[in-house]
Amino acid sequence: YKNQNGERVNLVPDAVCIPTNGFINKQHRTVVMGAGLAAEACNLCADAKRKLYHHLETNGNIPGYIGKLNYEGTSIKLLSFPTKRGIVTVNEDKSNIISIYRDGCAIGEKVSGWKAFSEYDMIEKSATVLKSIISKDALENVLVPKVGCGLGGLVWENVRDILYGILNEHV
């Protein structure tokens, strides 16, 4: 991967953060991890969805351990990193909803968080909790990809500034 200076680094991290949306389908006892890095995490760790569901039920929509994967004989922890709320209220111009879902949403309606864009305040909240996990568990190398910037629609430079401002001694 590349560090904050854009330099290629050959390092196996202790943990990798996976962007999540906090939505729980209680009827089917499952979560949505259907695209991007979340979908990749499900492909690499068969029980990631089950563990994320349990984590959300127990702890709420905050970062937490959702599985492990093995890379060249090393166990790497997977951490959820919420970038979206579980339920979102559609705003007046529907600008908080991903464009392909807007037609199916009514203004003021409460919709599943995975239909919405990521939010900067969720990045800040998640980074703050992540900082305490890093300290508590003495993690040395945690990979935080460009969370919230793909399908989440956030601008990487803004997300990067939030992450570095909170996790400065850990990145």
Image (cartoon, rainbow, N blue to C red):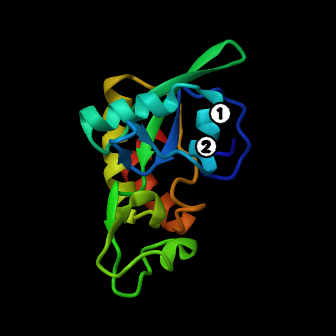
- CA neighbours of label 2 inside 10 A, class few (<14), some (14 to 19), many (20+): some
> In percent of the image, x 38 and y 31: which residue is there?
134
Compared across the picture, whether 41 is left or right of 111 comes to right
* Residue at image location 37% in from the left, 39% down from the top: 63
Q: Position of residue 128 (x, y in %)?
A: 32, 46
Q: In this view of the protein, which residue sits in the foreground, 164 or 133?
A: 133
Q: CA distance from mark 2 to mark 1?
A: 6 Å
Q: Residues within 10 Å of mark 1 (few under 14, many from 20)?
A: few
Q: Residue furthest top?
A: 73
Callout count? 2
In percent of width and height, residue 5 lies at 64, 52
Amino acid on which the number 1 mark rests in the picture: Asn
Viewer-side residue, 141 vs 78? 78
Q: Is residue 146 above or below residue 3?
A: below
Which kind of residue does numbered mark 2 sit on? Ala
Image vertical order of residue 49 relative to residue 109, above or below: above
What kind of element bears circle 2?
Answer: helix
Q: Position of residue 10 (x, y in %)?
A: 72, 32
- Which residue is the site of mark 1? 43
Q: Is residue 127 visible?
A: no
Q: Position of residue 76 (x, y in %)?
A: 57, 23
The reply to whether the C-beta atoms of the residues labelled 2 and 1 are less than 8 Å apart is yes
Indicate whether 122 appears above or below 67: below
Q: Which mark is residue 39?
A: 2
